[in-house]
Image (cartoon, rainbow, N blue to C red):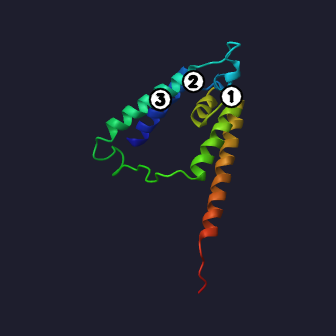
Amino acid sequence: MSLITQFLIGLLFGSGLTLAGMTNPQKIQNFLDVAAIPSGTWDPSLAFVMAAGTLVTYLGYKLVLKRKRPIFDTQFHLPKKKSLDAPVIVGPAIFGIGWGLGGFCPGPAFTALGTGSSQAAIFIVAMLGGMVAARLIALKRIGEKTVTVKA
């Protein structure tokens, strides 16, 4: 049941991204190019997509967190960390730079694969490479902090 529900949620999400034009990297880059406002090529539609997503997320959290537990788990897994540190700042900054340069973020990139977009395929390969590199760096940092005791 959970797999079917997840598939349907992903299908709804992908359909919304496609309908909003978020699978078109030029649409994202036109939004980020605020210097194009005087020329009329600036595209504000991404702001409306973000506002709608924020509203849906806010209402969803309000509704879901009234439950004693999630439908497909025994407990809620909410962030416990309340402070900002370098990974919390640097990670989103790298994400934003990649989004601006490539015109994709992960959801729309996977959705655009369905259209046969070679740009999306290149982006996904680079994104997965970055994820592997980040994991290796994190594991190396954890290993440096771990004290090994020889018997």
Which of 1 and 19 lies nearest the eye of the viewer? 19
Badge nearest the viewer, 3 or 1: 3
Which residue shows up at 46% across the image and 31% down it?
54
Image disc number at residue 46: 2
Q: From this viewpoint, is residue 82 visible?
A: yes
C-alpha distance separating marks 2 and 1: 20 Å
Quadrant holding the C terminus: bottom right
Q: Is residue 32 left or right of residue 2?
A: right
- Kind of residue at disc 3: Gly
Quadrant holding the N terminus: top left
Establish if 36 lies above or below 97.
above
- Residue where numbered disc 1 is placed: 117
Residue 37 percent coordinates (x, y): 67, 17
Q: From this viewpoint, is residue 15 visible?
A: no
Mark 3 or mark 1: name the one nearer the start of the chain.
Answer: 3
Establish if 40 lies above or below 145.
above
Residue 104 percent coordinates (x, y): 64, 32
Image disc number at residue 142: none
C-alpha distance separating marks 2 and 3: 10 Å
- Kind of residue at disc 2: Leu
Which of 143 and 97 lies nearest the eye of the viewer? 97
